[in-house]
Image (cartoon, rainbow, N blue to C red):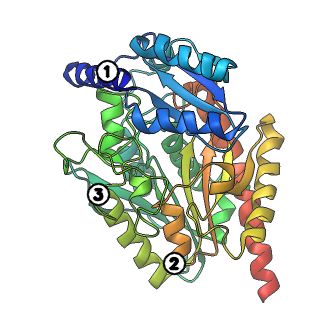
């Protein structure tokens, strides 16, 4: 393991001096532990070897784990996996060459300077879209800046309010993890559909709900994925001189540092030097607190990828929330609605039960601190064929099925409100 660690660190150094990180011949393997001993081996690999990147982290026995392995480590690590205890772990190759996925994704980019749902857009294009659609709908939409990122970029949201400040509020954020590009496209698609009078079912939601939507929460990290490292996950803070950034979804101040996060600054799940150490999470929490205190914040949703899951707090040792059954009922309604258009299957359930312990998450913060009626994390497409590098031709289908699920959730919220009255 020490040899592998040294090789991995050499690989990291090589990546830091390159102009743009390339993933030529990096492969993604799916490994499924069949007992606790095999699971422990994978946990050890995840915690002790920074040269590999776990696209899908270690969960329970029988649940698949997706591991991206660089070329110089593949022989050693795969030999160890395949010969473990003379039997080997169940494994197969998911992605033959990660760079080929990135290159294919890049081919979809257009020369247009405007945001398009046929390609992935830059932060500047996303912000221009927010400003233009708000300007075109001044009676309903307004754009606000709720803070500055570590590198000084504006952190923007759009508010949609079609008359009345007492209506329940739905808050949606996206791209808290930099490499999860599909999430900001779903967010902007949703904004467009809410303000599009040709889609009565979706635009009609503004009669019953106000919306706040943050298309890109981790703006520095997102721009870094576009210019330097497509698979970067964290923020870009420099509180630690060795490795930049923290995992913003391990940095919220509820249950922080109580498991499922790393104290190593080089880890993808690094929790930060303290709760809310990242300006991106601190300022988001201030905005959320203001809305929760001054308005009727009814539903919080954080968009992530990938795995096709509807995750319910808590992600800590606190276990299920008191209204877990209600979350499951509504989550199943959403999953059913999502499946009808393209057959895409989503699974609802508690974070720890479906994935793993993950303390310091935004959804836990919203439920644990603000007791939001409904709080979910959606893990969007896919289940591993493309992982974080989802082709652009899946943007619109992903967005359409998401809106189907959103309508189902809002119908359930309206029914619940009617019962109270």
Q: Earlier in the sequence, mark 3 or mark 2?
A: 3
Q: Position of residue 93 (x, y in %)?
A: 62, 16
Which residue is painted at 40% across and 17% down in the image?
A: 23
Kindly tell me whether residue 139 is visible in this rendering. yes
Q: Earlier in the sequence, mark 3 or mark 1?
A: 1
* Secondary structure found at label 3: loop
How dense is the environment of label 1, judged by Cα within 10 Å: few (below 14), some, or many (20 and up)? some
Which part of the image, by quadrant, shows the N terminus? top left
- Who is closer to the viewer here, 206 or 4? 4
Eyeballing the image, is 326 above or below 268? below
Which residue is painted at 81% across and 64% down in the image?
A: 329
* Residue 208 in the figure: left or right of residue 80: right
**Marks 3 and 1, how far apart at CA:** 24 Å
Is the residue under label 1 in contact with that under label 3 (CB below 8 Å)? no
* Residue 394 in the figure: left or right of residue 185: right
Eyeballing the image, is 355 above or below 368? above
Pointer 1: what residue? 21
Residue 194: mark in rendering = none
């Amino acid at each position: 393991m020490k040899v592998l660690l040294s090789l991995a660190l050499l690989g990291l150094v090589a990546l830091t001096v390159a102009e743009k990180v390339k993933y030529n011949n990096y492969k993604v393997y799916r490994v499924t532990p069949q007992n606790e001993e095999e699971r422990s081996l994978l946990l050890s690999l995840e915690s002790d070897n920074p040269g590999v990147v776990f696209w899908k982290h270690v969960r329970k026995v029988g649940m698949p784990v997706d591991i991206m392995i660089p070329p110089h480590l593949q022989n050693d690590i795969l030999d160890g996996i395949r010969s473990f205890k003379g039997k080997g772990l169940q494994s197969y190759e998911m992605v033959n060459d990660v760079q080929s996925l990135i290159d294919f994704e890049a081919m979809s980019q257009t020369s247009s300077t405007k945001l398009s749902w046929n390609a992935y857009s830059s932060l500047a294009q996303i912000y221009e879209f927010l400003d233009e659609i708000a300007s075109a709908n001044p009676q309903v939409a307004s754009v606000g800046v709720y803070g500055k990122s570590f590198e000084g970029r504006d952190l923007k949201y759009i508010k949609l309010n079609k008359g009345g400040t007492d209506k329940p509020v739905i808050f949606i954020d996206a791209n808290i993890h930099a490499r999860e590009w599909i999430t900001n496209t779903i967010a902007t698609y949703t904004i467009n559909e809410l303000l599009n009078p040709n889609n009565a079912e979706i635009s009609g939601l503004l009669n019953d709900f106000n919306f706040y939507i943050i298309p890109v929460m981790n703006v520095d990290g997102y721009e870094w994925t576009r210019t330097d490292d497509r698979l970067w996950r964290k923020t870009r803070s420099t509180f630690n001189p060795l490795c930049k950034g923290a995992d913003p979804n391990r940095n919220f101040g509820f249950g922080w540092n109580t498991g499922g996060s790393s104290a190593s600054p080089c880890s993808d799940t690094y929790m930060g030097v303290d709760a809310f150490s990242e300006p991106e999470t601190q300022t988001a929490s201030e905005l959320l607190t203001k809305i929760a205190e001054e308005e009727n914040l009814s539903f919080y949703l954080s968009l992530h990828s990938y795995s096709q899951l509807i995750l319910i707090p808590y992600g800590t040792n606190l276990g299920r929330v008191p209204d877990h059954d209600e979350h499951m009922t509504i989550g199943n309604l959403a999953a059913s609605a999502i499946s009808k258009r393209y057959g895409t299957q989503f699974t609802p359930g508690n974070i720890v039960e479906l994935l793993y312990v993950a303390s310091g998450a935004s959804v836990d913060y919203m439920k644990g601190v603000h007791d939001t009626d409904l709080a979910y994390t959606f893990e969007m497409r896919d289940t591993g064929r493309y992982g974080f590098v989802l082709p652009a031709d899946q943007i619109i289908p992903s967005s359409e099925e998401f809106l189907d699920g959103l309508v189902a959730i809002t119908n359930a919220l309206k029914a619940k409100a009617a019962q109270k009255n």
